[in-house]
């Protein structure tokens, strides 16, 4: 049975909340019918999650998913099972089984790097996934690398064509085993984005975002630009300075749209925004969302309850039509901002996963239902589809935009 998401016409706050906000309309962002398809998320008869066994229909803490086109294929980073699940066509029914996988010898197996050596078709905590123009990129976070396929895989365990962050496919050490990073190393890289022929990697452990001006075609190719640090050799939190417009603490996702660039800086509880694509290393952002200014970093603006203008560890970002969608992960919700009205500390106008902007709580403090969320880590958009990696519920949602 589907449970319709309620979009209240006004936000009525409970009394006694320190961060009370005006009553604002919540504009519908996704279909009120709920997700069109849910993959994974098995529950017992009591409504609670059951132990997750690897199979063609199960997912364990997926942190990233994307559609290459509205017709497919669909790629899901099944993070806890250390594998990439592939549906060649866009699924149209709940629990539809995956047809291909990368990272394990079969659908019943699990384990980091398939319990063997690092290779061109192994994974160790895969997270971010990006697919565009026939290119597939996967952030293989705990192997400290990004794998690239020039052409979507045609069968299970097709080896990647290119590896970044390591000199070759056998490498798996942070910053290639050195203390300092460089333009060709990675450390706990969690996010990857392909946009306008460029590649962006959220190099989370090095507290920076790297950009390649084209899709690399050789192993270990160095990045062309770095943000979050003044140069390629620093990895200090917030660039070794006080929190501000330059440094980052836990960058996790990147969006590029309409020549603007946004970074989900989860550790500083904010989204950094550049009005135009940066052209020099260490370019400071123009403004932030989620905080009153670039020198603030407390979750929910130092309050327990959220508002339409605050966030708590935002890990995911995407652009859906005219909205910037933020996976406000620790508040277990998605919030949508009008893309043409972004400004310092702007308030979201759309809400998914909670009944009102002042609410928080995994699955609204109840057993999971079709329209609830529990620590959504990744979001991606393709046409009218929003793909949500609802990690805490061990599932992926395909949800259409509101009419």
Image: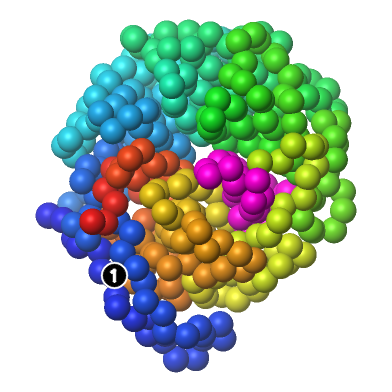
> Which quarter of the figure has residue 166?
top right
Name the residue tied to disc 1. Answer: 7
The residue positioned farthest toward the left in the image shown = 1
For the image, the number of numbered tags is 1
> Which quarter of the figure has residue 190?
top right
In the image, 252 versus 69, the foreground residue is 69
For the record, the magenta segment spans: 248-276
Q: Is residue 55 left or right of residue 303?
A: left
The N terminus sits in image quarter: bottom left
* Image x and y of residue 14, in percent: 41, 86
| Residue 38 appears anywhere in the view | yes
> Which quarter of the figure has residue 30?
bottom left
Residue at 36 percent of width and 72 percent of height: 26
The local secondary structure at tag 1 comes to loop
Q: Is residue 245 above or below residue 185?
A: below
Magenta span: predominant SS is strand
Residue at 51 percent of width and 85 percent of height: 20
Q: Is residue 101 left or right of residue 326?
A: left
Visual colour scheme: rainbow
* Image x and y of residue 147, in percent: 55, 18
* Image x and y of residue 299, in percent: 62, 66
Residue at 60 percent of width and 10 percent of height: 217
């Amino acid at each position: 049975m589907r449970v319709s998401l309620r979009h209240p016409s006004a936000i009525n706050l409970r009394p006694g909340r320190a961060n009370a906000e005006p009553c604002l309309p919540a504009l519908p962002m996704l279909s009120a019918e709920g997700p069109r398809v849910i993959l994974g998320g098995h529950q017992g008869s009591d409504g609670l999650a059951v132990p997750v066994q690897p199979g063609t229909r199960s997912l364990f803490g997926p942190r990233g998913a994307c559609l290459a086109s509205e017709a497919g294929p669909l790629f899901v980073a099944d993070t806890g099972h250390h594998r990439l699940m592939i549906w060649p066509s866009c699924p149209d029914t709940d629990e539809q089984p995956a047809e291909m996988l990368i990272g394990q010898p079969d659908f019943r197996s699990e384990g980091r790097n398939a319990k063997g050596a690092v290779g061109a078709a192994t994974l160790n905590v895969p997270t971010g996934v990006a697919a565009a123009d026939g290119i597939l990129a996967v952030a293989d976070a705990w192997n400290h690398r990004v794998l690239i396929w020039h052409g979507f895989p045609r069968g299970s365990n097709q080896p990647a064509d290119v590896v970044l962050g390591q000199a070759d496919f056998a490498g798996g050490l942070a910053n290639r085993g050195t203390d300092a990073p460089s333009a060709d190393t990675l450390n706990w890289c969690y996010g990857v984005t392909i946009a306008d022929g460029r590649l962006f990697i959220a190099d989370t452990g090095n507290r920076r975002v790297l950009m390649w001006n084209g899709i690399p075609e050789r192993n270990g190719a160095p990045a062309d630009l770095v943000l979050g640090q003044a140069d390629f050799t620093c990895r200090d939190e917030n660039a070794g300075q006080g929190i501000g417009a330059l440094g980052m603490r836990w960058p996790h996702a990147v969006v590029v749209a309409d020549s603007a660039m946004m970074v989900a800086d989860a550790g500083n509880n904010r989204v950094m925004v550049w009005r135009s694509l940066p052209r020099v290393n260490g370019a400071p952002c123009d403004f932030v969302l989620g905080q009153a200014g670039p020198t603030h970093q407390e979750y929910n603006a130092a309050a327990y309850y959220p508002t339409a203008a605050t966030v708590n560890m935002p890990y995911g970002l995407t652009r859906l039509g005219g909205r910037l969608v933020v996976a406000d992960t620790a508040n277990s919700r998605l919030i949508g901002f009008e893309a043409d009205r972004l400004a310092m500390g702007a308030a979201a106008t759309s809400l998914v996963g909670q009944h009102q902007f002042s609410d928080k709580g995994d699955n609204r403090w109840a057993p999971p239902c079709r329209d609830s969320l529990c620590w959504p880590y990744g979001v991606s958009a393709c046409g009218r589809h929003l793909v949500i990696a609802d990690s805490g519920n061990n599932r992926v949602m395909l949800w259409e935009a509101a009419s």
